[in-house]
DNA sequence: AAGCCGGGGTA
DNA sequence: TACCCAGGCTT
């Protein structure tokens, strides 16, 4: 069983807070105390690097500076601003939650664990991060950085991908919070994990905790944290049609749930085993859009890897041979420049860019 | 408990 | 290549 003394906790807190005051980065969301703005930053930062988030957060705050602005914004416009960040359910959940804060909390982000955790898209980490950073509430905020720092500092060999381990790290992280310093302390743990106690080749010589780090004392810092291995992406063949009608091409909206929910893309679908890409297009397009299609020529190939699957996409130029263009809520006909106005997955952005290059 | 859900940076 | 990133939701 893990033993951490009160004196040890005090020492860790002192060292980390001093180090943080002298070394913290000047990040845009550290210049505000607005809980809404900090909340948005935490959602963007889920599984996403700081450097990636910065320009997105700046644009988002310019367009939606308040809870009310985001609550009343059109969903597709918000999705467009999120385009390229990935994990698009994050922004759908965020807007749902912000609308609830607008309607039920008078626009004020709740400051209790129970209330904020009830909001969609707010899990244990985000709840703790917003409460501690924005309101200085002494609750833990355990992300990947904190797992790594604490597993090394106290030489904890539990598999951090297991829920039981998460609870253990959370209680430890809560125990370590110096009185009145929840905001700075939680951020200092994450900052150390991001800049010093990094996954590979941790910079122990410049670490403020080196003298008290149990893993360093045993030379085990490279072996922690322990986490289960994940499966490789599953390969999937995708057939895509660039369907022309004059100077316009067809884009269709994906379902509002599942992969890339609500985004626009060129029509097509998954190639069944044994079928070719062309056969798939000949089957899917008329079936879904009620018009015969003629495949004219191969246009481009796109490879795109997600966290759990790998698209092998082949696109073909096509034309409609029927007498009318399909028209529906989930279908739009756009010229190549208008393609930039709708939120598209990166794989299809590559096709759109290739089309714009033709002009 | 395991799977789903993006995209990009790094060694 | 493989890992991992200020994770959360669904089944």
Image (cartoon, coloured by chain):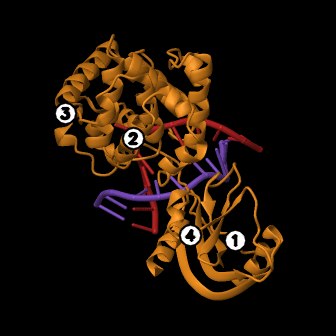
Chain colours: A orange, B purple, C red
* Spot occupied by residue A299 in the image (x, y as percentages of width and height): 57, 83
Q: Mark 4 sits on what residue?
A: A335
Of all residues, the one furthest to the bottom in this rendering is A297
At a point 17% along the width and 39% down the height, the residue shown is A206
Is A103 drawn above or below residue A291 in the view shown? Answer: above
Judging by the rendered image, the residue that carries numbered circle 2 is A57
Q: Secondary structure at mark 4?
A: loop
**3D distance between C-alphas at marks 4 and 3:** 49 Å
**Residue ID for mark 3:** A23
User: Would residue A350 be found to the left or right of residue A316 on screen?
Assistant: left
Q: Are marks 2 and 3 on the same chain?
A: yes
Label 3 and label 1: CA atoms lie apart by 50 Å
Whether the residues at callouts 1 and 4 have beta carbons within 8 Å, the answer is no
Question: Is circle 4 on the same chain as circle 3?
Answer: yes
Q: Residue at x 34, y 44 (%)?
A: A54
Q: Chain of mark 4?
A: A
Q: CA distance from mark 1 to mark 2?
A: 33 Å
Tell me the chain of label 1: A
């Amino acid at each position: 069983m893990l033993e951490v003394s009160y004196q040890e906790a005090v020492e860790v807190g002192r060292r980390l807070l001093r180090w943080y005051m002298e070394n913290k980065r000047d990040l845009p969301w550290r210049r505000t105390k607005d809980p809404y703005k900090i909340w948005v930053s935490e959602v963007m930062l889920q599984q996403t690097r700081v450097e990636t988030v910065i320009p997105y957060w700046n644009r988002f705050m310019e367009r939606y500076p308040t809870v009310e602005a985001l609550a009343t914004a059109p969903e597709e416009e918000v999705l467009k601003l999120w385009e390229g960040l990935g994990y698009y359910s994050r922004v759908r959940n965020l807007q749902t939650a912000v609308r609830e804060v607008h309607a039920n909390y008078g626009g004020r982000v709740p400051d209790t664990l129970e209330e904020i955790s009830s909001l969609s898209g707010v899990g244990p980490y985000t709840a703790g991060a917003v409460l501690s950073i924005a309101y200085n509430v002494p609750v833990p905020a355990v992300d990947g950085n904190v797992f790594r720092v604490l597993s090394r500092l106290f030489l904890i060999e539990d598999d951090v991908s297991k829920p039981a381990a998460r609870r253990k790290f959370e209680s430890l992280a809560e125990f370590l919070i110096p009185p009145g310093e929840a905001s700075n302390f939680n951020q200092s743990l994450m900052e150390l994990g991001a800049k010093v106690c990094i996954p590979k080749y941790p910079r122990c010589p410049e670490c403020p905790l080196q003298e008290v780090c149990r893993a360093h004392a045993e030379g085990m810092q490279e072996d922690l944290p322990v986490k289960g291995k994940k499966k490789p992406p599953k390969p999937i063949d995708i057939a895509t049609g660039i369907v022309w009608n004059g100077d316009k091409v067809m884009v269709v909206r994906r379902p509002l749930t599942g992969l890339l929910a609500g985004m626009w893309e060129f029509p097509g679908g998954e190639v069944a085993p044994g079928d070719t890409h062309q056969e798939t297009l000949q089957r899917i397009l008329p079936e879904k859009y009620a018009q015969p299609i003629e495949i004219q020529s191969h246009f481009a190939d796109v490879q795109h890897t997600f966290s759990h699957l790998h698209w092998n996409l082949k696109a073909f130029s096509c034309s409609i041979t029927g007498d009318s263009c399909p028209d529906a809520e989930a279908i739009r006909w756009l010229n190549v420049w208008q393609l930039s106005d709708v939120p598209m997955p990166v794989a299809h952005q590559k096709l759109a860019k290739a089309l714009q290059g033709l002009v």
